[in-house]
Amino acid sequence: MPGLQIQNISMRFDLPNGSHVQALQDVSLDLKQGELLSVLGPSGCGKTTLLNIVAGFLAPTEGSIILNDQPAIGPDAERGMVFQQGALFEWMGVRENVSFGPRMAGKRASEWAENVDHLLDVVGLQDFKEKMVYELSGGMQQRVALARCLANDPDVILMDEPLGALDALTREKMQGLVLKLWKETGKTIILITHSVEEALLLGERLLVMAPRPGRIHKEYRLPFADMGVGKDLREVKKEPDFGERREEILGMIWDMEEEIMGRTEESA
């Protein structure tokens, strides 16, 4: 079946002193093709570890990742990553960055040029395609990172706090762009964020993860991502259900953080 299956994933890190950290414990999730999932949780709950396992950067202690009925082992172009800082090549221009994947795959310019220009147009950077990366603002650099990821045509896009370093206005604009790209491309997206509002706005499905060992505490299915496509996101935030969910999840995560602080004080 097309889609992504996270099957009984556990991750244990063994430390040099003989102790260990159980970062994840028996995490399972099925994502259909084209679903948009946001993931929230207190610090240290394993959100980024889970994303790195799906990306193939880490091999889990137990469990498996299945993509389109095939085991997903190691990094692969089918799973594209967008980092908090764009991880762009500053010595290259914008168009060179976006075309990097197809060029490294050995494709001729005639095979990728039209698509790269289309993606630059979609993310609003057509007029900046000859600029160097260091000449762009943070928001523009994240647009380049999105376009570069899409140029590889992955089945799944993984985003690790991609908007966290942006100012409030730019972040809101980028949230709208993520929703636009999600609807237009039909890609499966997993987005890690520390912002409850962002998780609500961008999560067709939303996971709240519990403190270490990381596991799924609660899942929500939400209407706000669909509502926000092509609309003013500030209007979506005014919905009564949005405010109720925000307060519910904030309280949930606050209680988890209090629990973590209590554990820390006891072990001190």
Image (cartoon, rainbow, N blue to C red):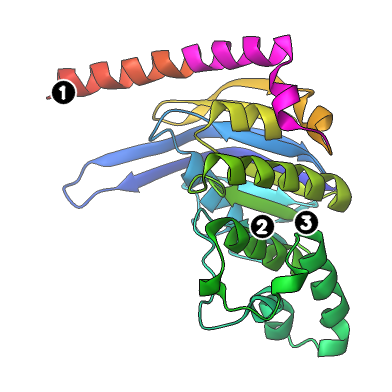
Quick check: marks 2 and 3 in contact, CB under 8 Å? no
Which badge, 2 or 3, comes first in the chain's sequence?
Answer: 2
Residue 77 visible in image: no
**Left or right position of 167 against 225:** left
Mark 3 lies on a secondary structure that is: loop
**Which residue matches tag 2?**
72
Disc 3 from disc 1: Cα separation: 44 Å
Q: Which part of the image, by quadrant, shows the N terminus? A: top right
**Left or right position of 73 against 189:** left
The residue type indicated by label 1 comes to Ser
Disc 2 from disc 1: Cα separation: 38 Å
* Range of magenta residues: 231-251
Which badge, 2 or 1, comes first in the chain's sequence?
Answer: 2
Query: Image point 53% across, 58% down: which residue?
Result: 138
Residue 147 lies, with reference to residue 209, above or below; the image says: below
Residue 13 visible in image: yes
Query: Image point 67% across, 34% down: which residue?
Result: 29
Q: Look at the magenta stretch and give its main secondary structure.
A: helix
Which badge, 3 or 1, comes first in the chain's sequence?
Answer: 3
Dot 2 crowding, Cα within 10 Å, few <14, some 14–19, many 20+: many
Front-lying residue, 22 or 267: 267
Q: Position of residue 159 (x, y in %)?
A: 60, 49
Q: Which part of the image, by quadrant, shows the C terminus? A: top left
Residue 68 lies, with reference to residue 169, above or below; the image says: below
Q: Determine if the magenta segment contains residue 248.
A: yes
Residue 155's mark? 3
**Left or right position of 251 against 218:** left
